[in-house]
């Protein structure tokens, strides 16, 4: 009788696993890979494979980029995520009451650039960026997010606005980032704090964008309608046009990075460089 119960239990668990795997395989892709430079990895149900252009991205897929590598993904035809080298992130999605969608980008390490085309967002749609110690709500904007380590994150707003806060149980006041502002979030739990808002220059913003420019020629004189149209086919144009204020800024040469130390308890190294923000706004 004991052996019979054991066999039945094993078959039941196998059936559940197979059913979950089947449902996972039947998912409609939440996104598509629009560009890959270098080596990037997609992990689906604990099975790693090489990330390639035109790959479909399912909810709960994990993306890793290697050294001197980057990738860009388009989600829902309205938002793109460009991943810098030595970064890891995943996307989750849920349907809100009324049919709106909440997409959550979980940045575990490294840096990403998130572009959201406001004109393509439906009423009630939400896009959230989570790091280990911060939550940013964006709608129709471009945000640079970097998970420096478990207790420090950096956010820079390159267009539009975003609401930035510490997750509960922290009681630190939230901050509203506007175009060309940035801040750091330090600490975890009740000790998490949103830093002072700082202004950044066009040149500094261009420096931030430099690692995210995947090889593709894009016109700099794109207007809003062109940005939306081309954003579906190639979201790089959103990043290019966001800094256009009459002229395209000159991209300065970044400081050569040093060797990164290993992250405690993990095999994904931290980002190569961290941005140094200017002095706080007075």
Image (cartoon, rainbow, N blue to C red):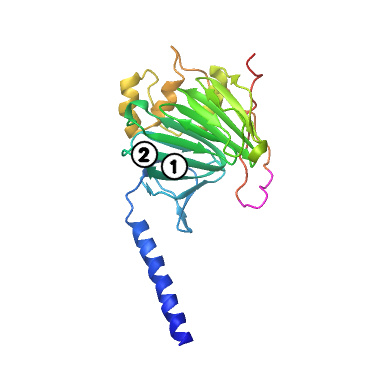
In the current view of this chain or complex, which residue is farthest to the top?
Answer: 246
Please state the horizontal and vertical placement of residue 32, each as a whole percent of the image.
36, 43
Q: Quadrant of the C terminus?
A: top right
Q: Residues within 10 Å of mark 1 (few under 14, many from 20)?
A: many
Q: Which residue is mark 1?
A: 36
Residue 101 is marked as 2
Residue 206 position (above or below residue 63): above
2 vs 1, front mark: 2
Q: Pointers 2 and 1 in contact (CB under 8 A)?
A: no
- Dot 1 falls on a residue whose secondary structure is strand
Please state the horizontal and vertical placement of residue 204, each as a whole percent of the image.
57, 21
Residue visible at 55% across and 21% down in the picture: 181
Residue 186 position (above or below residue 94): above
Q: Residues within 10 Å of mark 2 (few under 14, many from 20)?
A: some
**Camera sees residue 217:** no
Residue visible at 45% across and 88% down in the picture: 1
Residue visible at 36% across and 64% down in the picture: 19
The residues tagged by marks 2 and 1 sit, at their Cα atoms, a distance apart of 27 Å
Residue visible at 43% across and 35% down in the picture: 127
Q: How many marks?
A: 2
- Dot 2 falls on a residue whose secondary structure is strand
Please state the horizontal and vertical placement of residue 82, each as a whole percent of the image.
46, 36
In the current view of this chain or complex, which residue is farthest to the bottom?
Answer: 1
Magenta segment: 261-267
Quarter-of-image position of residue 156: top right
**Camera sees residue 80:** yes
């Amino acid at each position: 009788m004991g052996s019979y119960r054991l066999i039945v239990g094993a078959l039941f668990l196998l059936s559940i696993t197979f059913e979950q795997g089947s449902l996972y395989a039947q998912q409609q892709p939440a996104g598509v890979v629009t560009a890959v430079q270098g080596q990037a990895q997609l992990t689906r149900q604990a099975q790693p494979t090489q990330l390639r252009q035109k790959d479909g991205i399912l909810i709960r897929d994990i993306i890793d980029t290697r050294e001197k590598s980057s990738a860009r993904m388009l989600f829902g035809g309205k938002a793109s995520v460009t991943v810098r080298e030595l970064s890891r992130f995943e996307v989750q999605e849920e349907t809100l009451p009324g049919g709106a969608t909440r997409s959550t980008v979980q940045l575990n390490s490294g840096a990403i650039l998130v572009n959201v085309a406001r004109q393509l967002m439906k009423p009630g749609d939400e896009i959230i960026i989570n790091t280990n110690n911060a939550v940013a709500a964006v709608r129709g904007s471009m945000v640079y997010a970097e998970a420096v380590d478990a207790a420090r994150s950096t956010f820079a707003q390159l267009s539009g606005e975003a609401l930035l806060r510490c997750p509960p149980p922290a009681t630190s006041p939230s901050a509203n980032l506007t175009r060309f502002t940035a801040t750091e979030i330090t600490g975890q739990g009740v000790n998490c704090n949103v830093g002072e808002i700082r202004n950044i220059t066009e040149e500094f913003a261009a420096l931030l964008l430099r690692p995210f420019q995947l090889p593709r020629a894009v016109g700099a004189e794109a207007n809003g309608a062109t940005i939306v149209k081309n954003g579906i086919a190639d979201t790089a144009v959103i990043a290019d046009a966001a800094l256009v204020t009459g002229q395209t800024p000159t991209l300065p040469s970044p400081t050569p990075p040093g060797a990164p130390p290993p992250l405690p308890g993990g095999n994904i190294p931290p980002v190569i460089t961290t941005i140094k923000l200017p002095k706080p706004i007075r």
